[in-house]
Image (cartoon, grey):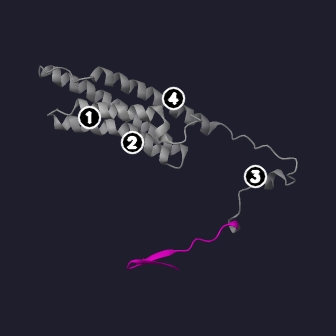
């Protein structure tokens, strides 16, 4: 996880994208538009929620979106089972690759849970104290205080007037 800088580096995101492509290809000729559309949406939701969570600015939000993604895995797995049963009752062959896609949802779900657990552990671990330099003579209290706001320029309010923006 330490080597991951962007969500595109995550193996679970890559597998989710591949699964979404597999679902779309398998359903390309399906005439059951309601189930097809729902399966396409849930399959797209898996990697999309991973990406959206990764782009959020907090670990708790990231975890929340990973849980949504995990829920979409269960949703898609259920829809794959239903699609197979419908096809069986209609005397049609099973959906191409459905067993493999069902297995892939299980794998992705486990990967997501591992990522969630890892992120949760990070939240509960205390932040290590940075090493102090022998030349740093400030007290520990002032050494770790955040910068005060006087180090930054005030933000100018911008308003739009017709096609021009002016600073107030």
In the rendered image, which quarter is residue 27 located in?
top left
Local secondary structure at mark 4:
helix
Where 151 sits versus 20, above or below? below
Q: Residue at x 48, y 47 (%)?
A: 55
The quadrant the N terminus occupies is: top right
What span is colored magenta in the figure?
151-168
Q: Earlier in the sequence, mark 4 or mark 1?
A: 1
Marks 4/2: CA–CA distance: 18 Å
Q: Earlier in the sequence, mark 2 or mark 3?
A: 2
* Disc 3 target residue: 144
Marks 4/3: CA–CA distance: 33 Å
Find out whether residue 167 is within the magenta segment.
yes
Where 31 sits versus 62, above or below? above
Q: Earlier in the sequence, mark 1 or mark 2?
A: 1
For marks 2 and 3, give the one nearer the viewer: 2
Marks 1/2: CA–CA distance: 15 Å
The answer to whether residue 95 is left or right of residue 70 is left
Q: Are marks 4 and 1 in contact (CB under 8 Å)?
A: no
Q: Earlier in the sequence, mark 4 or mark 3?
A: 4
Marks 4/1: CA–CA distance: 27 Å
């Amino acid at each position: 996880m330490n080597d991951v800088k962007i969500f595109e580096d995550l193996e679970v995101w890559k597998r989710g994208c591949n699964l979404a492509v597999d679902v779309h290809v398998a359903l390309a000729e399906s005439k059951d538009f309601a189930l097809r559309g729902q399966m396409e949406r849930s399959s797209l939701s898996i990697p999309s929620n991973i990406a959206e969570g990764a782009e959020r600015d907090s670990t708790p939000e990231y975890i929340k979106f990973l849980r949504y993604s995990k829920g979409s895995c269960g949703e898609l797995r259920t829809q794959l089972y239903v699609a197979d049963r419908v096809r069986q009752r209609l005397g049609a062959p099973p959906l191409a690759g459905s067993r493999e896609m069902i297995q892939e949802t299980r794998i992705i779900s486990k990967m997501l849970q591992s990522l969630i657990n890892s992120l949760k552990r990070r939240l509960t671990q205390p932040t290590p104290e940075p090493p102090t330099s022998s030349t740093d003579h400030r007290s520990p209290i002032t050494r770790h205080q955040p910068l005060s706001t006087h180090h930054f320029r005030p933000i100018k309010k911008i308003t739009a007037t017709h096609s021009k923006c002016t600073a107030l």
